[in-house]
Amino acid sequence: MDSVREWERVSLPAPRPRVAVEAMAGEWVRTNDKPQWIGALDVRVDGDALLVRVYGGGAGPSPQDWGVARTDTVYAGWLTSGDAAAGAFVARYRLPEADVELQANLNLGLLVVATYVRFRESGPYSDRFTREFFWRDE
Amino acid sequence: MIAEAALDLSVLVGDWRNTNPAAGIERIVCTLSADGGVTVHCSSSVRDWGKVDAPVYAFDFDGDKAGAFSAVYDFGFEEVRLQANVKQGVLVVATFNAFKDDSGRSNYFNREFFHR
């Protein structure tokens, strides 16, 4: 079996289980009161994928509303099941000045959101990495 | 990109070894690339992943030091997206692993830690 790591050499029945994307759905709000790149996320289930709406957090050139993006892929917490309680997703956004890849993962009930921001034109800003934390708005 | 080319890459460049001997990725070597980013060379106990060019990112919009990179490996049967950033001298690497074969393995997320 092809693999890139030792632990990937496992024999499992096909097809692979559905990733339980519902674990990541909800309204997520920032854990920090200070201005930050992302202020909140609205994550909804769309079949086997997620629809992710991002709201700016008041820092830098972050638009107030980034719009909705459908996830490229949703990842389980491990390769032997579809449990997404420690899973992750990736979505992409085209903002007025920059292209953003958003990568989020669940960790102990928090949504950890990293973004890779690449500006399409040279200017005052450096391409930037962000990592911010969100809890579910109950 | 001009801003990217000006970033100081010293925080990222180096020979990084996994803090866990039983880890998936054993070693990541980051060297300067011609385009102002880094070239990433990963290896595990089962495979030399080869080298890929990776764009670099600052921690601040007006920052001049690169503290993160992203890289993509496509092995045909599996795609691995690496998200790496240095925190307190440790390279924290999140991987987003998607299988393209019919092996029954789930796409999965993982995090590993590396020291120089």
Image (cartoon, coloured by chain):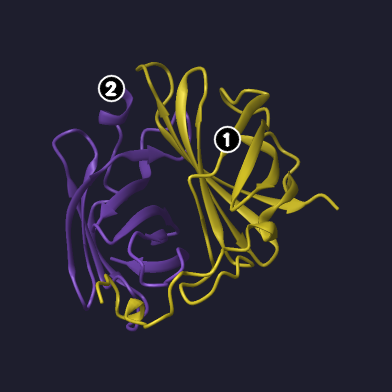
> What residue is drawn where x is 42% and y is 72%?
B104
Is residue A27 visible in the rendered image? The answer is yes
Q: Position of residue A95 (x, y in %)?
A: 52, 23
The amino acid beneath tag 1 is: Ala
Q: Write down the chain letter for disc 2.
A: B
What chain is the purple one? Answer: B
Q: Residues within 10 Å of mark 1 (few under 14, many from 20)?
A: some
Q: Position of residue B65 (x, y in %)?
A: 36, 39
Compared with A69, B100 (above or below) is: below
Say the numbered circle drawn on residue A69: 1
> What residue is drawn where x is 43% and y is 79%?
A13
Q: Nearest the camera: B60 or A103?
A: A103
> What residue is drawn where x is 27% and y is 43%?
B9
Compared with A74, A2 (above or below) is: below
Q: Nearest the camera: B51 or A26?
A: A26
Give the Cα separation between the discs numbered 2 and 1. 28 Å
Q: Write down the chain letter for disc 1.
A: A
The amino acid beneath tag 2 is: Ile
Q: Secondary structure at mark 1?
A: strand
* 2 and 1 marks in contact (CB < 8 Å): no
In which quadrant is the C terminus of chain B drawn? bottom left
Q: Write down the residue under mark 2.
A: B2
Pair 2/1: label in front: 1
